[in-house]
Image: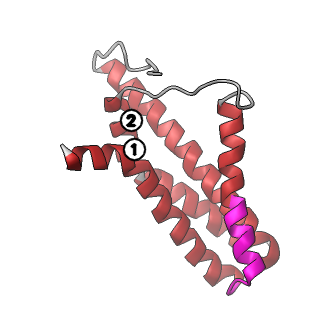
Amino acid sequence: MGVKTAVIDNSAAFGFSIMITSSFGALDKLAGSPSLVDILGFAMGAAAAFTVLQAVTTKGFRRRPGAGPREVDLLGTALGILSVGLGLGAAVAAGLTLPADAAWPAGAFLAAMAFMLGQALLIMLAAQLERLRGDPGADDEKE
């Protein structure tokens, strides 16, 4: 029971932790060793992506988001390796194309955004797979 709960409830956060840490490492190689200002920019860039998506999904923080069925969440987050790759790829693209001072905040923002949007697409795919398997409640949100 404990392992099952830990895996299901923490898999997206675990994937994000892997992605943001590896993105920091990639930017360190591509944009150079960060200053304290760069580190602050990196942290704020990643946090800003969450703020933007939270505002959008809650319609300006006026709607309470629901949770999907556990089977859908588990399948969607089990494919999280793809979201990790998308996020890391976004950070690498920022590191390769932007000046170092812009790469740190933009790289973190783009990495976090790519990860979360990738996770959302994977959960939508998982819901579709569950519907195809005959689960009519695959799209149901739980409050």
Q: Name the kind of residue labelled 2 in the image.
A: Asp
Say whether residue 70 is left or right of residue 13. Answer: left
Say whether residue 71 is left or right of residue 68. Answer: left
- Secondary structure beneath label 2: helix
Q: Quadrant of residue 88?
A: bottom right
Magenta span includes 34? yes
Find the distance from the CA under tag 2 to the CA under tag 1: 6 Å
Identify the residue shown where x is 52% and y is 70%.
21
Task: Pinpoint residue 99: horizontal percent, then vertical percent.
Answer: 81, 76
Identify the residue shown where x is 44% and y is 19%.
139
Say above or below: 10 vs 142.
below
**Cβ–Cβ under 8 Å for marks 2 and 1:** yes
Q: Which residues are magenta?
A: 32-45
Task: Pinpoint residue 112: horizontal percent, then vertical percent.
Answer: 61, 55
Estimate how packed mark 2 is, as few (under 14), some (14 to 19) or many (20 or more) residues with alpha carbons within 10 Å: many
Number of numbered labels in the structure image: 2
Q: Which residue is mark 1?
A: 77
By secondary structure, the bulk of the magenta-drawn segment is best described as: helix
Task: Pinpoint residue 124: horizontal percent, then vertical percent.
Answer: 48, 30
Identify the residue shown where x is 49% and y is 57%.
16
Magenta span includes 133? no
Q: Which residue is mark 2?
A: 73
Q: Name the kind of residue labelled 1 in the image.
A: Thr
Residue found at the very far left of the displayed protein:
1
Comparing 22 with 141, the one in front is 141
Identify the residue shown where x is 35% and y is 27%.
129
Comparing 98 with 112, the one in front is 112
Task: Pinpoint residue 141: horizontal percent, then vertical percent.
Answer: 46, 21
- Secondary structure beneath label 1: helix
Residue found at the very far top of the displayed protein:
136
Say above or below: 77 vs 29.
above
